[in-house]
Amino acid sequence: MIELTETTSGAIASEFLRSRRRAGSPAMGMVMTLVIVVDDETAEDAMAAARSAAQEHPARLLGVVVGDGRGKARVDAQVGIGSGASGERALIRLTGQVTKHAESVVLPLLLPDSPVVVWWPRDAPPDPASDPLGSLAQRRITDAASVPSRRAKAMLTQCRSYAPGNTDLAWTRITTWRAILASTLDQEPGKVSAASVSSERISPSADLLAAWLSDRLRVRVTRHVSEGPGITGVAMTTRSGEISLQRSDGKLATLTSPGQPDRPVALRRRTTAELLAEELRRLDPDDVYAATVKRMVTLSAAGAAARTRARKATR
Amino acid sequence: MNPLRDPQDRRLPRIAGPCGLVIFGVTGDLSRKKLMPAVYDLASRGLLPPGFSLVGFARRDWADEDFAQVVHDAVREHSRTPFREEVWKQLSRGIRFVPGNFDDDVAFRTLRQTIEDLDRARGTNGNHAFYLSIPPRYFSDVIGQLKEHGLAEQVGDAWRRVVVEKPFGSNLATARELNAVVSEVFPSGSVFRIDHYLGKETVQNILAMRFANAMFEPIWNSNYVDHVQITMAEDIGIGGRAGYYDGIGAARDVIQNHLLQLMALIAMEEPTSFDAKSLRIEKQKVLESVALPRRLDLGTARAQYTEGWAGGVKVPGYTQEQDIPAGSTTETYAAIKVGIDTRRWAGVPFYLRHGKRLGRRVTEVAVVFKKAPHQPFSATATEELGKNALVIRVQPDEGITMRFGSKVPGTAMEIRDVNMDFAYGGSFVESSPEAYERLILDVLLGEPPLFPRHEEVELAWKILDPVIDYWADRGQPDTYPAGTWGPPSADAMLRRDDRVWRRP
């Protein structure tokens, strides 16, 4: 890694070019720019996850650490390519006034023409699409499960501000669940009359899974709280009996369906790098996610209204 | 209609429905190194149904647990994805073994019993694929037994499929016999012929490159293309395959299937859609319009490798390999020139070559373009400029190379060839599944686009049979030292057309 202190975007771009030449390979096989908005604490893990995802989607990785807003505006960067990873990467630290203008640093560093993805591994803006950095991107990835504060509300906030191109890793986490549930239902024609989802107390993924089931199946989905980890079970009632997928250890689940023997199913909780790799596979707006977040907002409004009615009734 | 399915939902992977796979010949190398690891990798990626079952059939005195241990070891050693206990738990509970010979009625009764037990205990619902990883001479025994014991019957919605590996016969007549044996028992939609090349990502990318882009199509014809070279080179000898290889040779072993299929994908017209039928129609049209050169002595070459130094190792010649008779006329190198009689390709020769113990291991398709009709530069300026080429590298180092002229930095105007590289392998390698994963999953899903049908197999033999017959009457093949790029006769064959082989 090359250290650049008190630098500019232009200098970072030249360093990319120089590093590529030094490595003897001026060819660029990169397919996107991935901007990662991090704090000092999470920078290392997030960059590692992004590097691993970049094995599948060679990218220019731009880590942006937004530091203290006081004092003189200053940009520092570490730039590197290669060493076992494809693509290029820079970790850029902003302090002083420039922290308010991070997009001015990032804009000149975007790869020509290729898609731009912004990922907020922890704290995300309440409305990513209108965020100055977020508005540079086709794809905006948030992670409601890892925000440091007000976690219970984080998912709903993202749902309310949904814009095409937004997505949340809480949604990515349930792809494996959804795949097994969908393929199980292939074998069980007939209407589902009820469904339930159990999970640890705060689980944005479970909220989304319940909203998705409710949206697709047009039934009420009940929620149960369990010890975790994460989502621990889903049940769907069909005319011929109950389909249930239970996972208590975060690794191996058991699938029960009517007239069939119980079967073990590997259903591991995936690493951030794997989630990110899945997320980068498609960069067009995710219509199913859009429908699901819409449903979640409706359900939450209905829930709030019901609670108000209940409070009035008891009064 | 399943309400949880939505065509818009492209995150959801295609998971096979409840089913099982029965492998005949589980003790073989292919089975250990490719099939079992591919099954595990599919399970690990969550693409196999819960309750998936794997039944091994072989002449070994094994219990289910012994076989499970064999699978476990094979997976540990050869799988692509990391070994995970929970995936193994899901898979191992469905592993069964049936000991016996291919002509042993008791064994096939046990197999039937095993499959029925699995339907009950694992919920495989009567859906089973039979993978014949065995020499073709046993096909008729096994398929006859499957029929006799009612294992090939498809009751209700349940399916039975059969998977066969190359060689699909050794000439047109034997290919037809083989097909007769298989199709007597299984309908053609239930027969999956595996040509593992077609499962490779790079080969599928040929279709993406040709038909998803605008910039290649306008020049993809005889107005711009000078000729096409399709090469599959191996650096290894015949190794332990003497029994199979001798009498078969390079042309039957590789050109008949892999190279002609690659050629069909390069030369075919755009299919109307990407379903199996449309693809097959287009590939078939190409194979039907292939024309051999009028003089086979000038348009083909064949040779055997002789003792030599290959990559710093001294290696024996073909006739010195174990179990190869001294006077063997089997070729280890074959090159043929074919034309395609269509408007698009009229006058564009396709040169196909394959050999063992060549310079290095490489498979590629090179589309070589005509020279620019006029050069405003002086003859000395363009002396080093060759023909433009587009090279599709199939393996190793999968990708695409474009070769074109560029100015040499400096004051004088000199133009020489440069390469522009797209490394498909380097970029997408992590997620890039093995060919066998893709193909086994397609068998279980019942999606046949990547499998050649018997019509294509027969057409390929029709192309090759005259060449092989011609060679059969011509005694000993030429020779080339191991570790080199083939015999002088192959170079002469291109020189007559005023062309040269690419050094791949």
Image (cartoon, coloured by chain):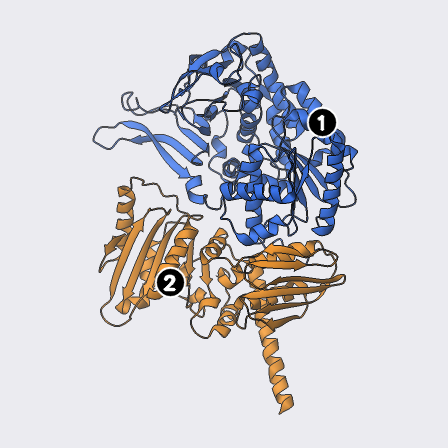
Chain colours: A orange, B blue
Is B36 located above or below residue B472 in the figure?
below
State left or right for residue B383 relative to residue B462. Answer: left
x then y, percent, for residue B449: 62, 37
Q: Identify residue type, mark 2.
A: Val
Bin the neighbour count of mark 1 within 10 Å (Cα to Cα): few under 14, some 14-19, many 20 and up.
Answer: some
Contact? badges 2 and 1 (CB < 8 Å): no
Splitting the image into 4 quarters, where does residue A305 fall? Answer: bottom right
Residue wearing tag 2: A37
Taking the image as drawn, is residue B125 in sight?
no
Quarter of image, res B484 = top left
* Residue type marked 1: Ser
Tell me which residue sits at (64%, 90%) in the image: A314
Question: In the rendering, which numbered label is found on residue B140?
Answer: 1
Q: Are marks 2 and 1 on the same chain?
A: no
In this rendering, is residue B355 above or below A57? above
If the image is split into quadrants, where does the C terminus of chain B sit?
A: top left
Q: Residue at x 47, y 54 (%)?
A: A274
The picture places residue A8, in percent across and down from the top left corner, at: 25, 57
Percent coordinates x, y for residue A118 in the rendering: 41, 59
Dot 1 falls on a residue whose secondary structure is helix
Q: Residue, x 70% and y 36% (percent of image)?
A: B189
Q: Could you classify mark 2 by the number of other residues whose Cα lies within 10 Å: few (under 14), some (14-19), or many (20 or more)?
A: many
Q: Give the number of the disc on residue B313.
A: none
How far apart, in angstroms, are the residues tagged by discs 2 and 1?
A: 63 Å
